[in-house]
Amino acid sequence: MSRSLRQNLGRLAFYLLLAVLLVYTIFPFYWAIVTSLKAGSEVFQPTPFPLRPAWNNYVVVFQEQPFGRQILNSLFVAVSVVLLSLALAVLAAFALGRIPFKGRRLLLFTILGVSMFPQIAVLSGMFELIRWMGLYNNLLSLVISYMIFTLPFTVWVLTTFMRELPKELEEAAIVDGASPFVIVTQVFLPLMGPALVTTGLLAFIAAWNEFLFALTFTLSSEQRTVPVAIGLISGASAFELPWANIMAASVIVTVPLILLVLVFQRRIVSGLTAGAVKG
Amino acid sequence: MAARANAGSALTRQRLKSAWLFLTPMLVVLALVAGWPLLRTISFSFTDAHLSNLDDSSFIGFENYVFLLQDPDWWRAVQNTIFFTVVSVSIETVLGLLIALALNAHFKGRGLLRAAVLIPWAIPTVVSAQMWRWMFNDVYGVINEIMLSTGLITEPWAWLADPQLSMAAVIAVDVWKTTPFMALLILAGLQMLPQDCYENAKIDGVHPVVVFFKVTLPLLKPAILVAVIFRTLDALRIFDLIYVMQGNKQDTMSMSIYARQQLVDFQDVGYGSAAATLLFMIIALFTVIYLYLGGIGREEKA
């Protein structure tokens, strides 16, 4: 066998491997789309694409439950969580990233430790707290409880970002007599656009996808978020699930996320690795 | 001179004051949503609290823990969780390493593939669980269909009902969903490796496989270790994926699912809190190990 033939074969094998990888990552979502477009008994036939796309499944999802309302619920919760955690985290990150004080490292590692908390470990205490605040079956209960996983992460990533901003900027502002609050909001905040987008996106995705708290702290279908709504369609009998509808609902809530991820691919990767590698 | 030093320390004092001022809102929120509920969960675990009257419970010492340690279902959940964690994290590490190596090579369409790899990560866990539940369906599932038509199996497998297969199915979905995260962390590590070792090896004509095991793998070890610990901590608290795919079935019940069932379905807050507290202890132990390793890494760098 000649050398160039062997090289070509090697290249072919490599591309074949990549093709397998591509199919492996994409096929399940492709299959969800295909299923969501099948009408009636066609769902139960393994045709690789819908013969006549049945858009009706997407209409039925909104008729059988307050799905529109549930999407708005998820949006409200996720957006509130992002804004609140970013506001709290920017201030905290300035203190942790730029002002040396005793116990700073311990504090940082404690915050990182909180992000490792299993949600179940705070479930009963959180439930009691939420009932005491009168927020059971209220979306605000989710906005509050989601802070447990978005806040540590945003503080951590923004702190690493703050640390790398040039010192001269701050010194110039101090000479001009700017207070720390002015430095954060007028000098640093405008520079933090990219970092805020990255952490905000990751916090948004985490809040949008959360299941356990939403399952426990909300009751009526008007207050449910999307993951609970989709997770609970499975409820009744195991034999006659409305698979086409479940897949239609799944596609609706996933497409925006996939678009976000594709658009902000680089930012998301750098945000994900900032937490782990730089930590 | 003295005046300037004074001004400097006044400035330091002002900055210190504002540091704590800036930290306070975040710390208050964290104490409210993490510290306090955790303390309450731990204290519930020593009581006979019931969901219908949380306020009226009495202290019963370690009784919940004694019952818990005698409950075969709890041990089953522990065993399931550990099995799930070890198997899924191992597969994810090997697969993630392979994908990272592939994505690190130069080829056309690398950006496209890198984006595609992120898709499973972006899909909500609940949606992934439903998608795969449908694909694993014993009668109409596409997986059985493909395996039957290619002759891999001769009759449909009951992926989600068979006790042995159902754990394999759950692990397969977790691997699909979280390998991208692993691959990206390892890829980030790969891209920070010094290039000169490779060039030397290339000049010396060392076989690529030898280079991988002698050069790449040892250098990558820290990055892989961090990724493995992250994933392990995550896998130990697994809830959504298994709960949506399998509900409270014993064959695949994890520790989190066990605790939630006691807390919510059986309304036994005291007992469920004891289970949750034990899970917390296990994860806390791992976290301390991780922070210790991370801390050492930092000092070496500094």
Image (cartoon, coloured by chain):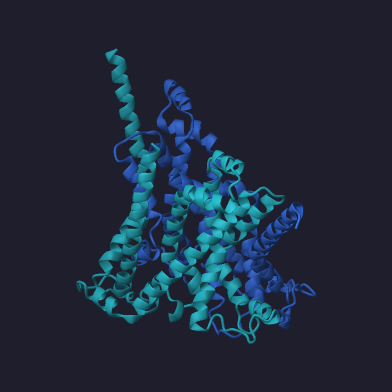
Chain colours: A blue, B cyan
At 61% from the left and 76% from the top, the residue drawn is B134
Q: Is residue A84 above or below residue A163?
A: below
Q: Is residue A156 above or below residue A137?
A: above
Q: Residue furthest top?
A: B1
Q: Quadrant of residue A41?
A: bottom right
- Which quadrant of the rendered structure holds the N terminus of chain A? bottom right
Q: Residue furthest right?
A: A52
Q: Quadrant of residue B74?
A: bottom left
Q: Is residue A109 above or below residue B116?
A: above
* Residue B73 x/y as whole percent: 36, 80
At 52% from the left and 52% from the top, the residue drawn is B186
Looking at the picture, tell me which residue is in the foreground, B156 or A196: B156
Q: Is residue A220 visible?
A: no
| Left or right of residue B257: residue B196 | right
* Residue B57 x/y as whole percent: 24, 73
* Residue A140 x/y as whole percent: 45, 59
* Residue A95 x/y as whole percent: 39, 37
At 52% from the left and 84% from the top, the residue drawn is B162
Q: Quadrant of residue A98?
A: top left
At 75% from the left and 77% from the top, the residue drawn is A47
**Number of numbered discs overlaid on the protein picture:** 0
